[in-house]
Every structure is written in structure tokens, then in C-alpha cells.
Amino acid sequence: MRRFGGLLLVLFVAACGSGAPSLSSDVGSPRTHRIETPTGAIEIQTFDRDSPTTVHMITATPAAAWEVLPAVYESIDLPANMADSRSRQIGVVNLQMPRRIAGRTLAEYFDCGSKPEGPNALFYAVTMTVVTQVIPEGSDTRVETRVEGSARPRSVSSHPVKCTSKGTLERLIANSLQLKALEKM
């Protein structure tokens, strides 16, 4: 019985230590990168872990998709502060997000951990970088969107917590882009 109890203790401790890290854990200090653009230099912050790029395919030429992409960002309340026509990228870089995007709360788009009161994305200041690129793929267009960000309590100075995308914003961008591109055809 003693051996069995020891085995249970070892399994319990191993199980506690092997879980995935909490989404609200401290991600450390962001790294700042300086990027030169045709309109001047911008600085972006990235975190140690790479954020995944979400890919959607749309039925439109890359030229048509690129033409309407700024209007897509504007229509969903993302004020683009970065654009590169050569690589066909547009985005918001290090933007403290408004409380809503396209009429929905930030908690519907981002997971920044939670407290007993609810999701941190509802109460914290959320800073995000959202960059979308349109790329030729046969006769269609591949829409790649990368989202990364962090959140901090509004009233207290503390380390940021990493925010991860739920994929909702990337789908919204791709779907809106498809609709606007079709309207242009």
C-alpha cells in the first residue's frame, strides 16, 4: 500500500507540472524591432513565442484583393497604420485596441487569460499587431493574417500577459475581403 501511495503522489506531481502553460502567464518583455517603410520608420513589438499565421483562400485576384484590403480594415474598425504595396501587406502595428471591433467585444477575438470577473480582454488594455498579406495562389488569392499581442491591467503597472487569437478576426478579415473583392468584379 505504501508503494501505491508513493506512486500516486509521483503521478499527481507529474500531472501538475506537465500541463500546458497558462494563457495568462507573464510573457516577459517584448522585443522591439524598427522597420523602415516608405512613409517613415515604425517600431513593432514581438514576444518570444511566434504567433501563428492564419491562412484563408478567397476567389479573387491578388490585385483586386489588395485594392479593397484597406477598406476591409476600415469597415471592421481597424485603423491601419502600416501598408506595403510591394508585399501587399496592411495592418495595425502596436495599436491599443478599442473596446470593440466590428461591434463585438475583444474577448470574442482574443484570449488574454481570465480572472474571476471574466476575460482579461474585457478589462485590460489590449495592444495588438494585426498584419494581413494577400498572395497569389493559382487563380485565387491566399490571405495570410498574423495576430500577436498583449494585455495589461488598465489601472496597475505590471508585466503584460500574452493574448492569443481565437481565429475570429482572421475569418472576419478574409470573409469581408472576399465580399468586397466580389463587389469589385
Image: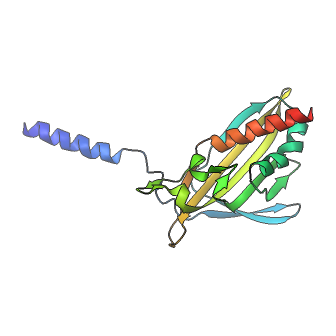
Q: Quadrant of residue 60?
A: top right
> In the depicted view, which residue is nearer to us: 115 or 25?
115
Q: Is residue 138 above or below residue 45?
A: above
Picture quadrant of residue 185: top right
Q: Tell me the quarter of the picture where residue 66 sits.
A: top right
Please count the marks in the image: 0
Residue 56 in the image: state x and y as whole percent. Answer: 72, 34
Q: Residue at x 84, y 48 (%)?
A: 71
Residue that appears at 66% across and 64% down: 32
Q: Is residue 161 visible?
A: no
The extreme front residue here reads 103
Residue 125 is left or right of residue 22, and the answer is right
Q: Is residue 66 left or right of residue 123?
A: right
Residue 158: % across, % down: 50, 70
Point out residue 135 in the picture as x, y percentages from the top left corner.
Answer: 81, 37
Residue at the right extreme of this rendering? 185
Residue at image position (69%, 61%) is 95
Position of residue 12 in the picture relative to residue 139 (left or right): left
Question: Residue 152, can we see it?
Answer: yes
Q: Nearer the viewer, residue 105 or 28?
A: 105
Vertical comparison of 167 with 126: above or below? above
**In which quadrant is the N terminus drawn?**
top left
- Relative depth, front residue between 40 and 126: 126
Q: Position of residue 31 (x, y in %)?
A: 62, 63
What colour-coding does the image apply? Answer: rainbow
Residue depicted at 80% across the width and 34% down the height: 178
In the picture as drawn, the residue positioned furthest to the top comes out as: 139
